[in-house]
Amino acid sequence: MKKIGDLYQSGDWKGEKHVPVIHAPEKVKKGEVIEVNLNIGEEIPHPNTQEHYIAWIKLYFHPEGSNFPVEIGSYTFNSHGEYDIYTEPYVTARFKVEKSGTLYATSYCNIHGLWENSLELVVED
């Protein structure tokens, strides 16, 4: 059986322009609002043209001990040159969590496919 997860690519975002970059605090207090910034092409800019663009980014949080991740947000970038308007794949998400876990970011490039990255988040009492 084929799995969609096998199609995701990853790498070091400092050397690969398609990997979602996750900026989040290393530690947060339980119940505190967390701000997470996601972008594509932080070190090596992604072109974002009509021919080559990031279509979407998704952010998930998988709490420790839980069976499944929770989708925090899904962000679609629709303008790829119409009337000379080009969206940049950069978003900010704000949310609260009660326990430590893993942040996952996924993205889709219309030419280079699916990409993923993750970051551990420690929640303190």
Image: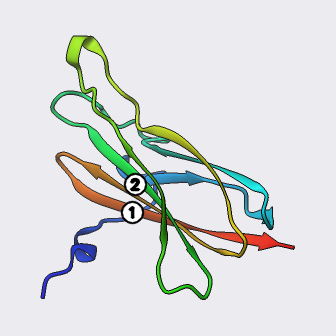
| Mark 2 residue crowding within 10 angstroms, few (<14) / some (14–19) / many (20+) | many
Q: Position of residue 59 (x, y in %)?
A: 47, 57
116 left or right of 8? right
Question: Which residue is drawn at the image coordinates 22% and 70% (left, top)?
Answer: 7
Q: Amino acid at mark 1?
A: Glu
Find disc 2 in the rendering and name its residue.
Answer: 19
What colour scheme has been applied to the protein in the rendered image?
rainbow
| Mark 1 residue crowding within 10 angstroms, few (<14) / some (14–19) / many (20+) | many
Q: How many marks?
A: 2
40 left or right of 23? left
The quarter of the image holding the C terminus is bottom right
| Helix, strand or loop for disc 2 | loop
| Helix, strand or loop for disc 1 | strand
Q: Compared to 13, does 77 lie above or below?
A: above
Q: Position of residue 118 (x, y in %)?
A: 51, 67
Q: Distance of mark 1 from mark 2, alpha carbons?
A: 6 Å
Q: Compared to 74, does 46 lie above or below?
A: above
Question: Which residue is drawn at the image coordinates 24% and 28% (left, top)?
Answer: 49
Question: Which residue is drawn at the image coordinates 36% and 27% (left, top)?
Answer: 87
Q: Amino acid at mark 2?
A: Val
Nearest to N terminus: mark 1 or mark 2: 2
Q: Position of residue 31 (x, y in %)?
A: 78, 63
